[in-house]
Amino acid sequence: MIDAIKKALEDLRIPCDIPEVTEGPHVVAYRLDPGYVPYASENTPPKRVLVNSIINRADDIAVALHVPSAYIRYGDGVWLEIPKEHRENVAYNDVLVPDGYQFPVPIGLDTRGESVVIDMASPTSPHLLIAGATGSGKSVCLNATIYGLIDRWDPDRLKLMMIDPKYVELSKFKYLDHLMKPVITDSYTAAVELYELIEEMDKRYIFMESEGFTDIGQSTMGRIVLVVDEFADLVSGRSVLPDLIATLAQKGRAAGIHLILATQRPSVDVIDGVIKANFPTRIAFSVVTNTDSRVILDQSGAERLTGMGDGLLLNAGTLTRFQGIYVSDKQMKPVVTKHSMKKYLAERAPNVTKEKDENGRTIGIRYTPPVQVQVQETRSGGGSSTAWVLLALFILCVMCALITN
């Protein structure tokens, strides 16, 4: 493949050497060392290949190599990334959390196969914005992020508030013991709960001021994460919601309140300047146009992603391509059930009985659905059988009295 890439680049008059090759779960990355354009004449000095000339010829490179897409990334060098024919799924346990992270959120594996993790306790990544088109892997990433939080943190150290305008995306978490409130599905309730969350934030700042703390990590108080799915649909319902979310984003980090917003409509009226300023950490999955990519990342590139968890992470000004974590429903169910039993049993307490062994130890629980008693309605115009019996007894008594007299 290296020889084919060199030949394709030479045919396009952008000769490059390839000193390094790395392989990730979904792409193979080739580091390009730009060379010099051949002489046009004896009097023309050689010119080094410009990075922009390589970026602008990405489509031509893909056609020459007979691959679906070719992505040019630069930062720590110039890299040509080509998708693998058979991509590998990234499991949750494949991503290792570095030491020293206070509030880590595993994301996936990069093109070198190294772990991609953000620390939401860091001032450079207090909140997370996830955007991408339908089917790009946005919802899978959101579910994996929530899974990572509840798997690592117990309910006494982490509280969640979830807003789901679509009703179904976050329904699997509706019994979580981590939830501060039931999953919110309408904009009016969302506004009320966000006001209460801001009040909680102010109370935390008052407590921190009285104790001389500058960060919630110095205390024993747990953290709060606000998760919003379909952020665009939510803010279009009530005009006050963007201001409330902006307030939490601006002041929430030091008080231990973090935001995770997801949207499939990355337009400028949704991801505006205020959101960008307070969400320096952003994830872009596959989008339709480079305009959408620029709205999310302030640069193009997301339109060339291959979907199915292939994403770009902008963190601390650095752009990293990664393959997101995939957590199946089968893998997620035990962890969600483990942290959902208290609320699940409390809702069904009148109909739950404990199963015990011969020694009196509890070995399981049994839920018995309530019995629905059906009452047969009396037909209109007719009497009940009991009324006819009483009437017959009354007539019989009257006849007996007449005969006796």
Image: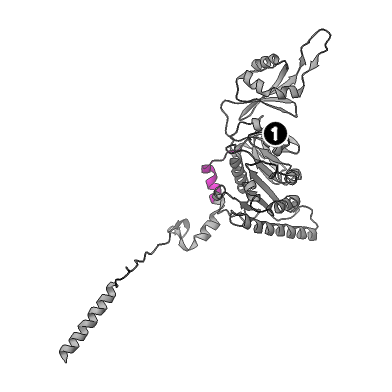
Q: Is residue 403 left or right of residue 326?
A: left
Q: Is residue 373 magenta?
A: no
**Residue type at the position of mark 1:** Thr
Q: Is residue 346 left or right of residue 83?
A: left
**Residue drawn 66% across the image and 16% down it:** 8
**Split into 4 quadrants, where in the image is the N terminus?**
top right
Q: Quadrant of residue 180?
A: bottom right
Q: Which residues are the magenta region?
A: 325-337
Judged by its main secondary structure, the magenta piece is helix
Residue drawn 57% across the image and 49% down it: 166
Residue 226, above or below 207? above
Label 1 belongs to which residue? 320
- Residue 113 visible here: no
Q: Is residue 4 left or right of residue 349?
A: right
Numbered marks: total: 1
**Which percent across, then down, holds residue 367?**
45, 57
Q: Residue furthest left?
A: 403
| In front of the other: 60 or 83 | 60
